[in-house]
Image (cartoon, helix red, strand yellow):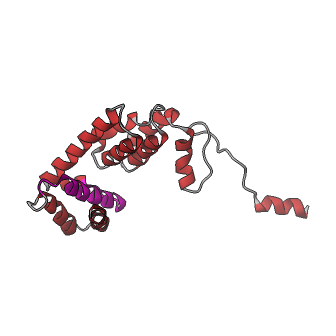
Amino acid sequence: GLQLLHGLALVVGGRNQPDEVSALLRLVESESVAGQSKVQRTIVLGVGDGLRRSGSSLSRYTSRWPAAAKMLAAMIAQSEQTLASEAASTAAQVKAVDVLAHGQFDDVRETLGKMLDSRRPPSVQLASVHALARFEHSDVPKLMIDGWQGLSPAVRLAPAQREGRRPMSGRPGSPRSGPREPNPARQWRRRGS
């Protein structure tokens, strides 16, 4: 049920057709799903995920749909409480970070920055790196660099590995580590000379 609904909302968000997105957000406000917070949450997050993938954002639409805006604000507030709780499981923290990625950068930057701390589990750090990378804000690089030393080694390597590049060692700006790739021109000169 909810997985199918999330998939539908994801496709609608990914298509980024204003009429389609508006129809789903209108559904969140309708009486047919009123009081069904799991259904409302699934729609809002599904549409938001799809919009992010298409290069847009949920905030572009929430000004026209107050119920969706209110639901998103409540989910962000709950997520921030989850991340502030020492008792929250790692899985709950990762889900909370994923919700924050749908907020306005200025509203969630402090919390996402705190998730880069070395005391956080690597999966929470990685979710925070991915969430921050979704924002097109001039302060994102500074926030990432400031949190770099707190990141676990696995998280430092993850972006490079995902892109198929050799990992960076140590800190931003340091030379690449790992074995050198052979230079065919250099090998040919050695053989021919």
Which of the 4 quarters of the picture holds residue 141? top left
Residue 42 painted magenta? yes
Q: Position of residue 140 (x, y in %)?
A: 40, 42
The residue located at (25%, 57%) in the rendering is 42
Q: Position of residue 192 (x, y in %)?
A: 89, 64
Which of the 4 quarters of the picture holds residue 38? bottom left
Residue 43 painted magenta? yes
In this rendering, position of residue 42 left or right of residue 143? left
Q: Nearer the viewer, residue 76 or 168?
A: 76
Which of the 4 quarters of the picture holds residue 129? top left
Is the residue 152 above or below the residue 135 in the image? Answer: above
Q: Position of residue 62 (x, y in %)?
A: 18, 53
Q: Which residues are magenta?
A: 34-58
Which quadrant of the figure contains the N terminus?
A: bottom left
Which quadrant of the figure contains the C terminus?
A: bottom right
Q: Nearer the viewer, residue 187 or 154?
A: 154
The residue located at (39%, 45%) in the rendering is 91
Farthest right residue in view = 193
Predominant SS of the magenta segment: helix
